[in-house]
Amino acid sequence: MEGIFKYDPVSFDEAASCAVILDQSRLPWEKSFLRIDTAEGMYDAIRQLKVRGAPAIGIAAAFGLYAVALKADDESLRDTFFEASALLRSSRPTAVNLSYALDRMEACYREHGELPSGRIRVALRNEAFRIKEEDAAMCMSVAMNALPLIERSGLRILTHCNAGHLAVSRLGTALGPVYLAMAKGLSPKVYADETRPLFQGARLTAFELMEAGIDVTLICDNMASYVMGKGLVDVVLTGCDRIAANGDVANKIGTSSVAILARHYGIPFYVLGPSSTIDPACPDGSAVEIEQRDGAEVTSMYFARPVAPAGVKVLNPAFDITPAEMITAIITERGVFYPPYDFTGRRDG
Ligand code: MRU
């Protein structure tokens, strides 16, 4: 596996005291890294999808907060830290991993808040790095739990959006078992939905799979039924931004359409994610706030010429809810969960 990933999508430069993110808004044209040490800088990076993908957003926010804590003077450390955390929390609403990471950083501050400021900063550093390390370990376990299922169903996979290496700490969620399969000498084949309006499938999934030497075929979103109907897809794997207690899943807009198609064609539809994506406080999908984004993302082809008449009315929800009953199973590092969903216990993978 070691040679597959050539760079780290989210890291922390200790010498320069800043978070470092691969600027995903410039992929696949240009690989450039952003160095961020302010709350406003990280807010903009998350809001503008320079770092995106539920787990990666959480890790970036944790590193961003740590960078802010390093810069703040001792007297204002507490106020600066909690103000920065509140700002980052408001950057995007749907993926629970953001508030999960910020909650952990805030709890860490509260636990160590009476210590000298130098020791508070050390505790925050350790917590931010732990969030990332745990995510990497969870991704590996998710992939190991998923691999036997896809070996059984077949290795022709359709995926939506990007839930690969770029979207997490390492490996990916939906694409984790794809990388594991390749490492095992198998030959997975991936159909990547382009994922309008921001083309995460075309720009990111196709890009990272090609870089890894994995067979990937890009399709427009409206071609999923065609490839499924032709018998070209054995299994659908997607990531997730928030899993409600009843198993409803918020993920990139269009995911629920793919689930409905998969059900129609009798193809297993698996959702993969770390258990940090389960939100026990969210009873079902109707309680998830769906981010509504700028209509310009729909009227213009990603940073190019408009593809719609000027002034057209636009609806641009960034996520949708896939009802629990449309999901064959939800795979986390704690095992494989089948309906009716109950995430309070462990399931065997
Ligand atoms: O708007 P994005 O690009 O952040 O949306 C990302 C997704 O919907 C991913 O599928 C999800 O975060 C899972 S990433 C492991």
Image (cartoon, helix red, strand yellow):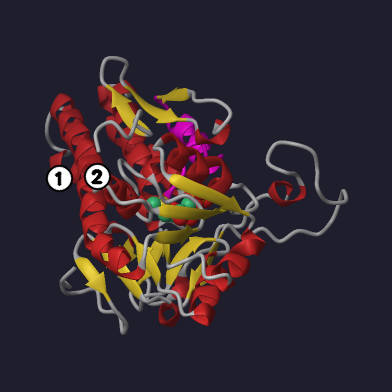
- Is residue 280 toward the left or the right of residue 311 in the image? left
Say whether residue 312 is visible. Answer: yes
Above-or-below relation of 85 to 318: above
- Label drawn at residue 111: 1
Looking at this rendering, what residue extends furthest in the top direction? 15
Q: Quadrant of residue 105?
A: top left
Q: Quadrant of the C terminus?
A: bottom left
Q: Residue at x 47, y 49 (%)?
A: 162
Q: Quadrant of the N terminus?
A: top left
Above-or-below relation of 13 to 143: above
Give whichever of discs 2 and 1 has the lower sequence position. 1
Q: Residue at x 24, y 48 (%)?
A: 184
Q: Which residues are magenta?
A: 37-53
- Is residue 345 toward the left or the right of residue 213 in the image? left
Above-or-below relation of 17 to 308: above
- Reading the image, the residue beneath label 2 is 136
The reply to whether the magenta stretch includes residue 39 is: yes
User: Which of 212 and 121 lies nearest the eye of the viewer?
Assistant: 212
